[in-house]
Every structure is written in C-alpha cells, then in structure tokens.
Image: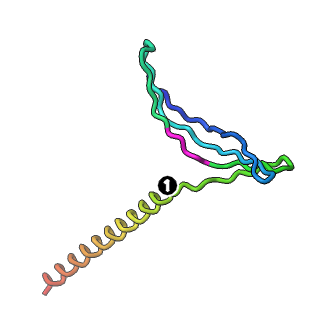
C-alpha cells in the first residue's frame, strides 16, 4: 500500500554572533508497505525551503531559499513557449500570404 509523505522539517538551532538560525526543509516522497508487513520501502526527497532567523529580542524572520534548478527550468519553459508561439504565428502568416498569392494569380 502506497502512502504519500509531505512534511515540513525544522533543523537544530545554531547560534551565530548572538543570533540563532534554524534551517527548514520539505520532506516529500512515497512510502510502501506490504499488506502482511513482510516488506517495506520508501522514496524520499529532502529539499531546503527556508531559514528561520531568531532575533535576540525573541522575534523571528523567515528567509526563503531560491531554487536555482526550478528557476532555470521555468526560464527554459518560457523560452520554448515563446519560440513555439512565434513559430505558429509565422506559419499562419506564411499560409495566409500563400493563399492570397494563389488567389491573385488565379484572378489574372
């Protein structure tokens, strides 16, 4: 039986120059267990998401961590979609131009 795993995990606090920082990560994946309990397995992925900064006065800030792979993939997707859109536009424009050229040659 497969069960999805989605959890937010906080790391240990570490003191740095009077501040305390605490890393956080997202644990995601799948867990599998046989019905009779003979075997089990899991696929897990741990990705860092943010860092909590605990100020000496007790307040805290959350600093999001950028994901360079995600940003690069989204950039490539946007570029591919833009190129495909321009290509479709140019093909449609070329077909329209060819139809008009055929009609004008038939009229002569």
Q: Main secondary structure of the magenta part?
A: strand
Q: Could you tell me which residue is drawn at 42 percent across and 18 percent down?
A: 39
Task: Tell me the quarter of the picture where residue 103 sits.
Answer: bottom left
Task: Tell me the quarter of the picture where residue 101 sits.
Answer: bottom left
Q: Is residue 75 left or right of residue 21?
A: left
Residues 103 and 40: in front is 40
Q: Is residue 76 left or right of residue 67?
A: left
Q: Could you tell me which residue is drawn at 36 percent across and 70 percent down?
A: 86
Residues 49 and 17: in front is 17
Work out which quarter of the rendered image holds the N terminus and state it: top left
| Residue closest to the far top | 36
Q: Position of residue 105 (x, y in %)?
A: 14, 84
Magenta stretch, residue numbers: 45-49
Q: Position of residue 82 (x, y in %)?
A: 40, 67
- Which residue position holds label 1? 70
As drawn, 48 above or below 103: above
Q: Could you tell me which residue is drawn at 18 percent across and 83 percent down?
A: 104
Label 1 crowd (10 A; few <14 / some 14-19 / many >=20): few
As drawn, 79 above or below 32: below
| Colour mapping used in the image | rainbow
Q: Is residue 66 left or right of residue 30?
A: right
| Residue closest to the far right | 57
Residues 40 and 90: in front is 40
Q: Position of residue 68 (x, y in %)?
A: 52, 57
Q: Secondary structure at mark 1?
A: helix
Q: Could you tell me which residue is drawn at 34 percent across and 65 percent down?
A: 84
């Amino acid at each position: 039986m497969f069960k999805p795993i989605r959890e937010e995990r906080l790391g240990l606090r570490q003191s740095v120059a009077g501040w305390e920082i605490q890393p956080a990560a997202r644990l995601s994946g799948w867990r599998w267990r046989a019905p009779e309990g003979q075997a089990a397995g899991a696929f897990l992925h741990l990705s860092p998401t943010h860092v909590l900064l605990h100020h000496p006065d007790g307040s805290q800030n959350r600093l999001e961590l950028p994901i360079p792979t995600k940003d690069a993939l989204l950039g490539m997707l946007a570029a591919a979609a833009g190129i495909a859109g321009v290509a479709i536009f140019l093909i449609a424009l070329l077909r329209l131009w060819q139809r008009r050229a055929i009609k004008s040659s038939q009229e002569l």
